[in-house]
Image: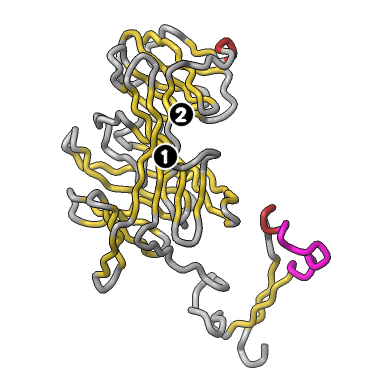
Amino acid sequence: LPDGRFVAAGNVFVNNFQISAINELETEAFHLWLLVVDENGCLDGYDCEEIIRINPKVNVEFNIGDQWIYEEENYFGGGNSEIGFRSFSIQDTLFDGIQTKYILGVLDTFYIDNNRMYFWDDYYQEYIMYYDWDATTSYEIKYYDQFTDSEEIATVVIDSITYEQLANNLLKVQHIHILNSRTLENYTDVVYEGIGAGYFGIKFLLGCGLCDDNPYTTKLRCFSTDSMSYNFVDYACDSTWLTTSVDDLRKDNIKVYPNPTSEELNIDGLDNMVFYAIYDLLGKLVQSGYTKDTINISEGNGLLILKLKVREKWIIKKVLKIE
């Protein structure tokens, strides 16, 4: 423009959830946008940034009483388990003049900054970032492995980003796998923006290869605040039950091979990623994680029990691991 300002124009891209909320007759009106910026590329009334964000996202805020409920399984042998739940809630807050810290009982303290979630680390005596909700490729987390007495770096690799419709909100979901977790050889998880991890607990398990995780946390059931509640399962958040028998679900359709195996185990017949757990004959958990087609059995030898959780029921297979 003659006075030095610029007019920027572009197209609007919408996903399936957003397009359903737009009046079909008005759709064409949303295809073009115009912004008038000054000679420095700045939009009046907004911070001057390389990317102009209309109604920019603010930091996630939590309140006392906000609650995460995760499912837990207590395996007590013979194919029998007690399925229950474990809840985490914000007990108190603390403002240090810079950040609001949220206290989860006596176990964890965390804060949010720039759409990232930081947890207190006793070893490093500082807050360590566990989630970067704006990341699109990967980021690193430093941690201390107490079993090997070593300082390690885990790499969180973001495989894809999707959106999930829950409680009339569209949640951003990072589908990730973690390299060098020292907990699971094939560590996969999902991370919900503004909430945290979908499996194993509120934050990633790093350096827990020898942790006693029976009962162990399997998945996020619910997250709730004063104003809303997300239910990630199709049953009540506080449901409990016992599994005293095994549903074979046409066992012949789910095959594991080679058996015996020296390490790699292939699985046929699974349509989706499922949780698995491997136990020795004494009922000790050897390994767990998520799989759809292969498992690398890194620990244990001899006869092992493989449990696959398919459609909320367990399928059990005997596997012989040899040197």
Residue 172 % position (x, y) = 53, 53
Q: Please, is residue 276 above or below residue 235 in the view? A: above
Q: Which residue is mark 1?
A: 199
Q: Amino acid at mark 2?
A: Phe
Task: Write the residue at 27% across / 69% down.
Answer: 95
User: Is residue 179 shown to the viewer in this render?
Assistant: yes
Residue 149 % position (x, y) = 16, 37
Q: Which quadrant: the N terminus? A: bottom right
Residue 141 % position (x, y) = 32, 48
Number of the label disc, if any, that sits on residue 268: none
* Residue that lies at the very extreme toward the bottom in this rendered image: 3
Q: CA distance from mark 1 to mark 2?
A: 10 Å
Residue 219 % position (x, y) = 43, 38
Task: Write the residue at 29% across / 57% down.
Answer: 91
Would residue 41 be found to the left or right of residue 317 on screen?
Answer: right
Q: Amino acid at mark 1?
A: Tyr
Task: Write the residue at 45% across / 13% down.
Answer: 317
Would residue 269 be found to the left or right of residue 157 on screen?
Answer: right
Q: How is the image coloured?
A: secondary structure
Q: Is residue 22 magenta?
A: yes
Q: Is residue 156 magenta?
A: no
Depth check, front residue: 185 or 24: 24
Would residue 63 be found to the left or right of residue 54 on screen?
Answer: left
Q: Residues within 10 Å of mark 2 (few under 14, many from 20)?
A: some
User: Is residue 176 shown to the viewer in this render?
Assistant: no
Q: Which residue is mark 2?
A: 275
Q: Quadrant of residue 93?
A: bottom left
Secondary element type, mark 2: strand
Residue segment shown in magenta? 19-31
Q: Are marks 1 and 2 in contact (CB under 8 Å)?
A: yes
Task: Write the residue at 67% across / 91% down.
Answer: 2
